[in-house]
Each structure stands twice: as C-alpha cells, then as structure tokens.
Amino acid sequence: MKNNNNLQNNAVLGLQSTATVAQTSESAQADTPIIQIEHLGKTFGENVVLKDIDFTVKAGDVTCIIGPSGSGKSTLLRCINLFEEPTSGRILFHGQDITATKHPSKFREKMGMVFQSFNLFNNYNVLHNCTLGPRKVLKMGKAEAEQLAKKYLAQVGMDAYINARPSQLSGGQKQRVAIARALCMNPEVLLFDEPTSALDPEMVGEVLATMRALAKDGLTMIVVTHEMSFAREVSSHVVFMDGGVIVEEGTPDEIFNNPQEERTRSFLSRV
C-alpha cells in the first residue's frame, strides 16, 4: 500500500514538474522578441537618415514610433520590411537575420504593411484587391481566398463594399480596405506608416477605431503615427525619434507623463 502511495505521489510530482516546464517554456516563448533591431543604420549617399537604432518587439506588442517629420520614422519602417536595404546593423525575425536574406518576399509574407496612400489597385474591386495577394503569393484557391477576404472586410466594417472600386470609396474606407488586404496575408506583424496622415479629420476616427480593435485582439503592430492620443491609449511601447536616432523609449506612461529627455518634452509640448 505504501509503495502504491509513493507511486501515486511520484506520478503527481511528475505531472506537476511537466506542467511547470511547459509553463516556463510558454513564458520564455512569450518573452522572446519577434523582432530585434540591432545597431541599424541607413544612409542615402552622404545623408545619414538612421543611426544606431536598437529596439525589440514581442508578440502582442503595439509599438508606436513618434517624432517630428524628417526624423527617420518611415525609413525605419521600410527597413524593417526590407523595402529599403539597411546600410548597417541587423534585423532579426524570430532570431534569424533577415538583412542577409536573398528572398525578402518570403519574409514579407509574414509582415504586412499599411501605407499612408492606401496603394489599392483602382482597376480592381474591393474583393479582388483583398484576394490578389493570397492567391498569387500564398497560392490559395479562389473560394478560400474570397472567404478569407470577406471575413476581414467584415472585421473592418467594409463587407458591404466588396464590389465597389477604390474610386467610389472615401479615404477612411480605402484605408480600412487596405488594412483588410494586409490581414488577408495572415501576417505575424502589421506595420502602419502614418495610416491617417492622408485622411480628412472626420475620417481619422474610423481608421483608428479599426486599429484599436486589432490591438485588442492581440495583433502585433508597429505604428508610425502623429496621433498622440492613439499612442498614449493603445500602445504598449513608445519610441521617440529625432534626427535619425532613438532619443527615448518606454511605456506610454513613461514617455507622455514623465519624459526624461528635453527633446521629448519639447516635441510633446508642441503636439
């Protein structure tokens, strides 16, 4: 009887140990950055645009990059997605240095991008704009691609416009279609390059509401933005850039309520 009790106790301890290891593994995985940017630099001729940029992005993070115009924010985003080739440094995606890849398109399948100018195809309707990538790049069948597109168009409130052409839509509607199109590629990370800067003020709210909902769903996002209220309320991490360098970074509370650098305080006082 005593031996049976010992066996039962050992089994329980074994299960507890296994559960602890699994929890530890899951915790470690959650703490592992999806993206690590190390000493990133970018020059155009003699013009130094980015200097020694370092920061990390973990799963579920909403990282907002703020700063004055011309500070290198959009160039940084384009380097992360390899639309621009970094001059120096590394970008690690799940630990792999993507700056050395010969096939950036394969990496871009996992990292979507939403542009300030929408970049929709005017000769295609909304549904076709959203199914083109999954069919051409992911080799998805037409029915599956359309089902996926309708799902994400419904998520951003644009499912009633599947047959409309971009020319028939408002700026806010176009941007929501662009967001749905990016989501159709099932990205791990979604990059936003000043997604509201080309919109009329009354249309900004509908796009920010869509982005807030995506953040609430746990989508990992890197957002270059001038919308300070969005950065304050939605982001988990704020990066302030000026003159091609990261001047300061931290939580929204740290950056907006207790900035340490004079350049940060000056910028926030103006906006």
Image (cartoon, grey):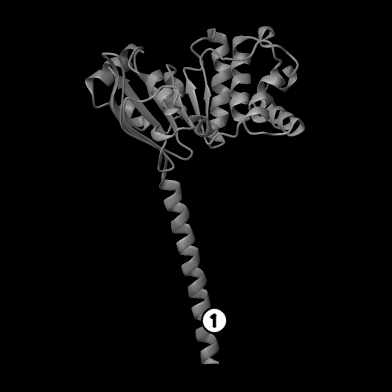
Q: Position of residue 136 (x, y in %)?
A: 65, 28
Q: Is residue 36 left or right of residue 263?
A: right
Give the position of the C terminus as an image quadrant.
top left
Q: Quadrant of residue 237?
A: top left
Q: Few, some or many C-alpha atoms within 10 Å of disc 1 (few <14, some 14-19, many ≥20)?
A: few
Q: Quadrant of residue 241?
A: top left
Q: Is residue 238 left or right of residue 147?
A: left
Residue 3, placed above or below residue 160: below
Q: Secondary structure at mark 1?
A: helix
Q: Position of residue 62 (x, y in %)?
A: 46, 32
Look at 72% across and 22% down and name the residue there. Answer: 159
Look at 44% across and 21% down and name the residue there. Answer: 229
Q: Quadrant of residue 129?
A: top right
Residue 62, visible in the rendered structure: yes
Residue 256, visible in the rendered structure: no
The residue at which mark 1 appears reads as 8
Given the image, on which type of amino acid does mark 1 rest? Gln
Which of these two is toward me, 65 or 188? 188
Q: Residue furthest front?
A: 102
Which of these two is toward me, 240 or 49? 49
Q: Position of residue 154 (x, y in %)?
A: 69, 26
Look at 46% across and 27% down and name the residue there. Answer: 81
Give the position of the N terminus as an image quadrant.
bottom right
